[in-house]
Image (spheres, rainbow, N blue to C red):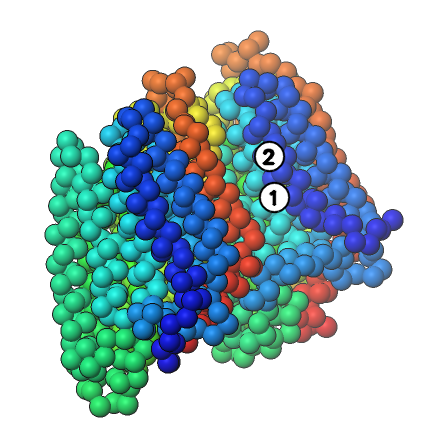
Amino acid sequence: MPIVPFDTSMIAAISAELLLLLLAGVILAVDMIWGSKQKDHLGWITAGGLLFILLISLIFTRPEPVERLIFGGMLRQDWLTFTFRLIFLFAAAITSLLSINLKGITGRGEYYALLVVTTLGMSLMAASADLIMLYLAIETTSIPLYILAGFMKSDDKSTESGIKYFLFGALTSTVMLYGFSLLYGFSGETNLYLLSERLTGGEISIWVLGGAALLVLVGFSFKVSAVPFHFWSPDVYEGAPTPITAYISTASKAAGFAVLVRVMITVFPEISLYWTSILAVVATATMTVGNMVALAQKNIKRLLAYSSIAHAGYALIGLVAFSELGIASLLFYLAAYVVTNLAAFAIVVFFANTVGSDEIADYAGLSRRSPGLAFAMLIAFLSLAGMPPLAGFVAKFYVFAAAVESGLIWLAFVGVLNAIIGLYYYMTVLKVVYLYRSDDDEVPIAVSRPAAIALGVSVIAVLGIGIASGPWLGWALDTASSLF
Amino acid sequence: MNFPNFPVLSIIVFTPIVSGMLILLIPADRIKLIRRAALSAATLALALSVWIFISYDQAAGGYQFIEQADWIPRLGISYHLGVNGMSLPLVLLTGIVIFTGVLISWGIDDRPREFFAFLFILATGVFGVFVSLDLFVLFFFYEIAVFPMYLLIAIWGWKKTREYAAMKLTLYLFIGSMIALVGGLAMYFESGMQSFDLLQLEKAGFSSSFQVFWFPFVFFGFAVLAGIFPIHNWSPDGHVAAPTAVSMFHAGVLMKLGAFSALRVGIMLLPEGAKFWAPLIIVLATVNVVYGALIASVQTDFKYVIGFSSVSHMGLVLLGFATLNKDGLMGAGLQMFSHGVMTALFFAVVGLVYDRAHTREIPRLGGFRKVMPLAALAFIIGGLVSMGMPGFSGFIAEFPILLGLWKAQPLVAIITVLGIVITAAYIMRVIRGVFFGDMPQEFEGHIAPIKIQDKVALVMLSGLLILIGVVPAVIAPLISSGADAVMRLVGGI
């Protein structure tokens, strides 16, 4: 694939990234000028700005009919980039809405600025077509996330979360970087597409290439929290401020999948049998470990952490299938999972804000306290469990369909059995919400306006993607076909 | 009277869920309004089901009231609905049970909004499965029908076992449906037709080995919900733990959902597989009939007796399927309808007795005919249906099943008749124990008479059982045409 020489239309292609940078600057500037009272509006500015950028990128960054490498081959303008960018922007906007009115966060300019920068990093991750660019983008994403996870300085758990995230992240990123250096050493290229041309032709032993692939997979597996690189996620999820947990579990994971899909399919198509077999095992382990350990959780954030590990496993099935439908189902799964998990975490944010607890047992009586909130939780959790008419059902349906299409019947059955374990623990939470009583039955849960908007949008998205999945699947299929 | 392009099936399917969502918007303290809204919605659903039942053109046969629209075109999934002789009676049955269920649930005062909303979501799922002509649509609605059950039982059920029973039931059904789902996907890709349309897949001509391999996944995956032995034991627990209306719905309609889907997807799409596995199904279903009846006869809990009788009677439906001949299939179709009405009636009466006596131990009950004569009469009618007495719908249904079975496996027919004899024994024991004899001291003067809503429900259900028994022509020819459709695929015509 040739590298297109610079022209001005490329500026439009990265308009979203430029605007994100601008937004981060604006937030920091405003933060310095405004008094502490006005700073409560920073969250609105961030959310509004992200929404605006979402619209702009929807209109101006649509890929050209033919995919192209831009900016000297650093970025690739294609449907994958476009789709993931929208997912990140959506998740970031919801996250900033959820952060408004939270103690210790609201009015802190650096919090929002970091959130915007990490979104910028993710967007570049999805677009990167060069090893150097890819690594920079991953670090641009990760470093602000480490800080955000440990943002509550006075809270031990949050600090622990930040440090743990950093240590695990730094380690796996080193291993990945070593893999990158091997790839460069073999091919003399850093551009993914040129690199893959050099690597094909069988000059390089499959074992060496496979080794490099394995090292690279370590880094990506950390990002998507696949077993055995998942140990960080429960602790980080539990300690981080809840909106950040929501963001790490959705957008950051999706970004990991974006690079995973692009690199594996672009650089290693020759040894696809090798890495799909590895990933099939990883997917099985990820689903099973995530679901099994989730069964024993007493804390809702830890439960959602393990459930998010399991969901990474389901999504991996799409990549293992290694077909257009497979990649499309993965994209669809991620979109469905992102909106669903945002809705689930939105409820956790409200609840902790009023009750001050993340223990599942304290959710007793929620359906009497706030029937509407309980119903939203029902929708979110059932979507996670894969029940129609919600997004999670069709997402699982497509993923299993992709597995069956590629002849991976056993993997489809593994997924099915895991879905049942999943249903069990989601139902246990819903049981507490609907069945048990608490002493505070009469005290409703306070829901602030921005958070209500965030929850409402997510729930509508869960229903919308679930019922009218046709156009979304079409989009995902188009995106997938731009990769092969 | 038939308006083309009028989406009557969609209206039937979505009336419950839409009204359920509207009911959720009513303020929680306006309980009367909530009940009335629920009743109006159920009435509408019933009226429309009766209307399509009457206006279905029997001479023309086949699928009617067809609606088709693209849903997920890239995978060949379309929103395709239609009813034929097999599914139409089940749509009517659902209408009847949802209507009588709402009447019976008049007294629910713990969060009635949520109760009716979940019950109606369930109803939408059930209607949807019966009218779907697309495999994806079928699974979509099937799963919708599974989940609300959990909350209905866990929240409003019998305190002692509700959490356990609700979880067990939901997991069993979900496992079954997900396994069947993989089978459905395998069919889709094997056919290579890029279509989930059931009418297309019927013509796919799957190879024998494919059919033999996948049939058990699909058939038994669905048959979990029909209560086939040995994966039936979620069902009595579930029936007993559920609140009255949910037991009615569950045993009356939901188990038919499993049987119907097993027939529609398993037998009709994989007929060769069905032929291969039929002997096993016959054995298991015979165990259902005899074992279910035996277990029912030693229960002392009134509701467990009925719960196990459902297992026994659903065995007859599955036996009818497994004969793979015209008589058996027609009998199975009739039995699905007849048992649905009968068991709804049983559970309604059990609920009425339990609400007043607060116990279901048969030895501690007695003499209830004095305080609720109508309920006693209704239960006796149900009992006569249950033992297959001529003049009642049970006979009309069980006779063809046994006829078909005699043609297929004479020995099994004899064993099955044994099960029916045991049924007669335990039904009569229950009638004597609960409704006749002397009323225990503790109940004298404490038992309130039954309400008008309950009377309407009981009269409606028992009247229907007699109507079909006396004039089978109201439903038999219709089901016969549905059985013909199956036979064309199985290759008996």
Q: Dot 2 surroundings within 10 Å: few (below 14), some, or many (20 or more)?
A: many
Name the side, left or right, on which B435 lies relative to B480.
Answer: left
Label 1 element class? helix
Residue B436 location, x and y as percent?
Answer: 60, 23
Residue B239 location, x and y as percent?
Answer: 50, 38
Q: Nearer the viewer, residue B351 or B138?
A: B138
Name the side, left or right, on which A460 lies relative to A302.
Answer: right
Where, quadrant-wise, is the C terminus of chain A in this rendering?
bottom left
Question: Mark 2 — residue?
Answer: B20
Marks 1 and 2: in contact by CB < 8 Å?
yes
Question: Mark 1 — residue?
Answer: B124
Q: Going 55% across and 59% down the picture, which residue do you hit?
A: A471
Q: Which mark is residue B1?
A: none
- Tell me which amino acid carries mark 1: Thr
Q: Going 62% across and 38% down the picture, which residue do you hit?
A: B18
* Quadrant hosting residue B136: bottom right
Q: Nearer the viewer, residue A261 or B152?
A: A261
Can you name the residue that lies furthest to the right here?
B1
Q: Going 20% across and 87% down the picture, which residue do you hit?
A: A204
Q: Nearer the viewer, residue B204 or B327?
A: B204
Label 2 element class? helix
Q: Relative to A374, is B263 above or below?
A: below
